[in-house]
Image (cartoon, rainbow, N blue to C red):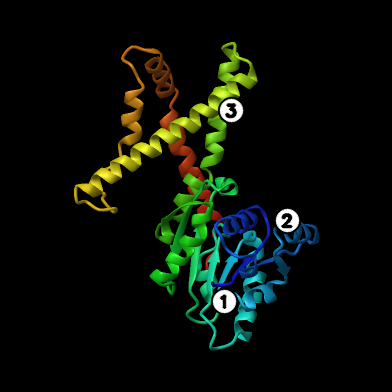
Amino acid sequence: MARIAIIGGGNMGEALLAGLLRSGRQVKDLVVSERMPERAKYLSEKYSVLVTSVKDAAEYAQHIVVAVKPTDVEPVVAQVAEAASLADSDSAEQLIVSIAAGVSTAFYESRLPAGSPVVRAMPNAPALVGAGVTAIAPGRFASAEQLKDVAALFDCVGGVITVAEAQLDAVTALSGSGPAYFFLLVEALVDAAVDSGLSRSVATDLAVQTMAGSAAMLLEQIDDTRRAASGAGFGRGFTGGPDTTPAQLRATVTSPGGTTAAGLRELERGGLRAAVGHAVEAAKRRSEQLGITSE
């Protein structure tokens, strides 16, 4: 089993560590680098994992996950590059996986040994509870097999989708920032229900369970639709048209002239679609501004 080094023991680094252990990875095949002494002690004691320096963690690892803040990437990559130069020339090629937001694969490729394979990954907050979704994008030198290896790493914290690197800013704006949009909507629903006479605890329970149940309905319906398309000979990559499942389910639960129709009419009148569109576009633009390239 390939040794995996996780550089950075913050929330997302810990989420990946915990997920890998849950999925059956052996603790002997995992190593963590964390510069904060208190955090390093916590990770070592909770997961019984070796916590060491960046150089030592990277030197013997086949997969190196860079899970630090973007501002900390440059010194980390310098240490990873130094470790790579000390590695046995006969050892397996090291694969760099970056979950540092906005740092391009070209940035890593320009600082690591020539031809180093790099894959960017953008997990989101629900990965902390094993229910996230991660978008992965290969750099110039990452092979299809290496991309599969990275997908297997993030399978342990939720779903995985492969995209082109140029699409990662849009991914950040949707799934990266999306949990905050969701929490805001729940907050608004709870406040509105309290104004309508419910207690806050009852309103919160109803809103959260309604959202969770609705998401489960949607996921099941999408899976059914894709299975039907596959059975009809279109295959897993069928893209014969836009997925209208959310609109179909909305129509299913909306009776003509009923309460749901009245509520939806007010949401449309209030510009919900336009507001969501503006939010995603603003988040995408900000992600582009924060990006770190090879320059």
Q: Reading the chain from its start, which is encountered first: label 2 or label 1?
A: 2
Callout 2 amino acid: Lys
- Amino acid carrying label 3: it is Glu
The disc at residue 46 is 2
Callout 2: SS: helix
Q: Label 1 sits on what residue type? A: Arg
Residue indicated by mark 3: 187
| Up-down relation of residue 110 to residue 182 (above or below) | below
Which residue is rendered at x = 31% and y = 30% of the image? 248
47 left or right of 171?
right
Secondary structure of residue under mark 3 = helix
Q: Quadrant of the C terminus?
A: bottom right
Q: Is residue 129 left or right of residue 48?
A: left
Q: Where is residue 249 drawn, in percent x and y?
A: 34, 29
Q: Nearer the viewer, mark 3 or mark 1?
A: 3
| Label placed on residue 111 | 1
Residue 179 visible in the displayed image: yes
Label at residue 58: none
Circle 1 — which element?
Answer: helix
